[in-house]
Amino acid sequence: MIFFIVIVIAIIVSGMTAAKKGEFFEDYCSPRSTGTINGIFSILIFLSHAVTYVSLDGTWDDPYFSMRKFLGQLIVVTYLFYSGFGIMESYKKKGTPYIKAMPLQRLFRTWYHFAIVVVMYAIVSIGIRGLEYTPLQIALSFTGFETLGNSNWYMFVTFVLYIIVVVSFLLLRKSKLLAVAGVCVLTALFAYWEIKIGLASQWYNTVLCFPAGMLFSLAKPYIDKVLMKNDLVWYCGFTVVFVLFGLFSQNRGESAIHHSLFAIFFALVVTVMMMKVQIRSSILDWFSQHIFSFFILQRIPMLVLRHYGYAKEPYFYIIMSFFITVVMSMLFDAAMDKLDSFIFKPRKKKEIKE
């Protein structure tokens, strides 16, 4: 597995540029920059999923598993953090109309793409693998609360967070600060509910990164003014954030709050670092443009290839799963673009005859 990590590192380093002394990358939170970061973690998520279907115990695999154990749920942290950040940035530019459009343009669009994928997993799990599910399991799988073999918890959390944003910003529309505070409170209550009903820790231990991203959006002008004053101030700021991340990495399993702070400071470490380091890669750009499809489809080839015995050759299995997922992602996104253009195309207003 270490060879795959070396390839990822090579891709990152080949596209990396450091800012000159006294200079900063002011576009460190642009869609392309955050998309590149998410592209990196998209590959790491793929590898993390793939190794659960194969048996690996070689000497060259140990370093990867040590890294995987440390990272844990950190591989989804930037997804949540930059999603919250992006929504807040859009709201600052477009206002309440953006929030009113979210149920259709963001929630429904994401959900029906996901629903189509769930049907694909049903075909694989029931039709090919011969598994049985209750009607309730099948119904709940379309919300992400249950699974038919697909990645589900992240999608369930995403749907709920979108609803929380809409509710908070419409009820507290007179103040964006109060609206974000509402998102923070409702997200915390949502995480508490997940804990109380006994869901696994991955369902809730990174969810607060979403409102943290919104808070960062509000504070960004002030953070930039301070940290971009000069290199010394930036180094001091980065050191503080990194030290706090290190402190919360110790015994992070003790509580959900402890782990949440650990995750938030990881997102901040990455974000502050991007003020001084820029990564530009056409490969990572591709992953950033196919984030959803590459993430949600990857278990289909993994399940099918394992069903037919290819998991006995771990490296061949992982490589084949990767390339099949890439092809599926391109086809899926092309199909969804056409379907979206039909479903969301502007309706012509009927002419009023006098």
Image (spheres, grey):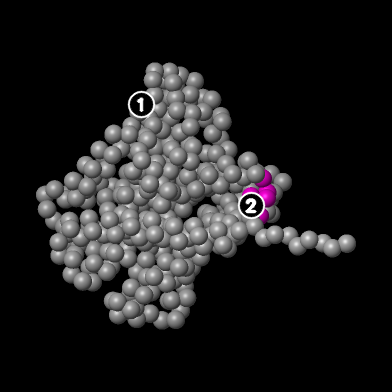
Queried whether the magenta region covers residue 82, the answer comes back as no
| Label at residue 18 | 1
Please tell me in which quadrant of the rendered image residue 308 appears. Answer: bottom left
In the figure, residue 120 lies in which quadrant? bottom left
At a point 47% along the width and 46% down the height, the residue shown is 81
Q: Which residues are magenta?
A: 95-100
Q: Kindly give the residue lying farthest to the right in the view shown.
A: 354
Residue 209: image location, x then y, percent: 47, 47
Q: Position of residue 212 (x, y in %)?
A: 50, 44
Residue drawn 22% across and 55% down?
319
Q: Observer-nearest residue: 164 or 309?
A: 309
Question: Which of the marked residues, 2 or 1, is nearer the chain's N terminus?
Answer: 1
The amino acid type, in three-letter code, at marker 1 is Ala
Label 2–label 1 contact, CB within 8 A: no
Which SS type dominates the magenta stretch? helix
In the rendered image, the quadrant that contains the C terminus is bottom right
Residue 328 x %, y %: 35, 60
- The answer, for residue 276, to whether it is visible in the render is yes
CA gap, disc 2 to disc 1?
Answer: 37 Å
As drawn, the label of residue 99 is 2
